[in-house]
Image (cartoon, rainbow, N blue to C red):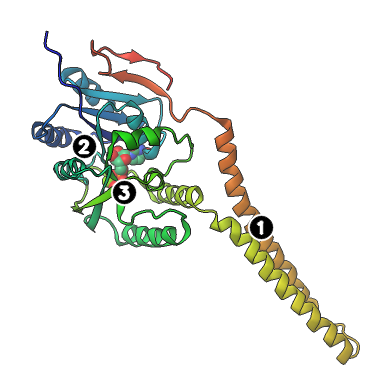
Amino acid sequence: MLQADPIRYSIILPIYNEEAVIPVLMLRLEQLLASLDAPAEVIFVNDGSTDTSAIFLAGMCKLRPNHRLINFSRNFGHQIAITAGLDAAQGEAIIVMDADLQDPPELVLEMIARWKEGYEIIHARRISREGETWFKRASANLFYLGLSRLAKVEIPRNVGDFRLIDRKVLEAFRAMPERDRFVRGMFAWLGFRTTYVDFHRAARVAGETKYPFVKMVRLALTGIIGFSDVPLRLAIWAGIGVSGLAFMYGLYAIAEWFTTKGIASGWSSTVVIISFLCGMNMLMTGIVGLYIGRIYNEVKRRPLYIVDRKVGFDAANSDQTRHVA
Ligand code: UDP
Ligand code: MG
């Protein structure tokens, strides 16, 4: 019997309530797979969808070779879904992309060309964004500007989670055990030979964004806290600044005591100082608390995700249920 060629490309797609886009997605993926020069696998990670996505995908994965599904037991979040896909990938070049076709599958061919030139991380960079509100665009710009000032590693701007990585990078990534994951920052931290391919980001083909404001803020905080300790150091500088001001005010009060008689006034300045200091204290405790919260999360050492069911992973293409990752 002829040995089948080993899988060279892994395509990872996180899915959260994407039933509206799956039919178009399958079509575009099929076109992409047909134009690849070596066998590829497609790994769908169903991140606890509450619609029919999982049923659709499980059926699809049973019918098609090298299509696999990892079904989470609940919604663990986009970044964790990507991680699960990366954990399962077998290819030499691994591609992560959104399922809503905002990341055009055709761009993968260009990424593969760069990979063959010897690059190990190829980020897709958005040179325009369509179908996103001005608020999303403005907040994203502000976030990337802030992050580039704060973070110790250069995290590329206008780059989301659409990228190709070499097997070597994947092995290094798998050695990063952190719980609070900001995947694009982690790849920046890893280093390796990196390049970019530019693209115009289209609007979602169907459905609506799964990143409401609260999730966006959470991701932004994870990025900042995971890659910068500037907020913690802020506490020291603010402390020094406030103490300096308080000291100067003390000098002023002593001078007043020498020059004026009978100082009964001073109530307002006392109140101002006390409330200011209390406010500073709370703010700083809060910042420290954020980091401690993350440490707590790390020391619990819970698994990153729980897999409820896997489809298409072994040769017999059979279901494996209740596998805990
Ligand atoms: N997604 C996910 N889990 C979530 C939220 C989103 O797996 O909790 C997936 C979603 O199905 C999509 C990708 O992550 O494939 C990006 O989400 P979306 O397109 O809603 O984000 P946006 O493009 O609006 O930033
Ligand atoms: Mg999208």
Ligand 1 lies under 8 Å from the Cβ of mark 3: yes
Depth check: 138 or 43 in front?
A: 43
Q: Nearer the viewer, mark 1 or mark 2?
A: 1
Q: Position of residue 252 (x, y in %)?
A: 79, 83
> Residue 160, labelled with which disc?
3
Number of the front mark, 1 or 3: 3
Q: Marks 3 and 2: in contact by CB < 8 Å?
A: no
Question: Which percent across, then down, holds residue 279?
Answer: 67, 63
Respond yes or no on whether mark 1 lies under 8 Å from ligand 1. no
Name the residue rendered at 34%, 37% in the picture. Answer: 169
How far is the residue under mark 1 from the one under mark 3?
34 Å
Residue 28 shown left or right of residue 309 in the figure: left
Q: Earlier in the sequence, mark 1 or mark 2?
A: 2
Looking at the picture, which amino acid does disc 2 mark? Answer: Ala
In this figure, which residue is indicated by the disc labeled 1? Answer: 282
Q: Which residue is mark 2?
A: 20
Q: Residue at x 34, y 60 (%)?
A: 135
Amino acid found under the numbered disc labelled 3: Gly
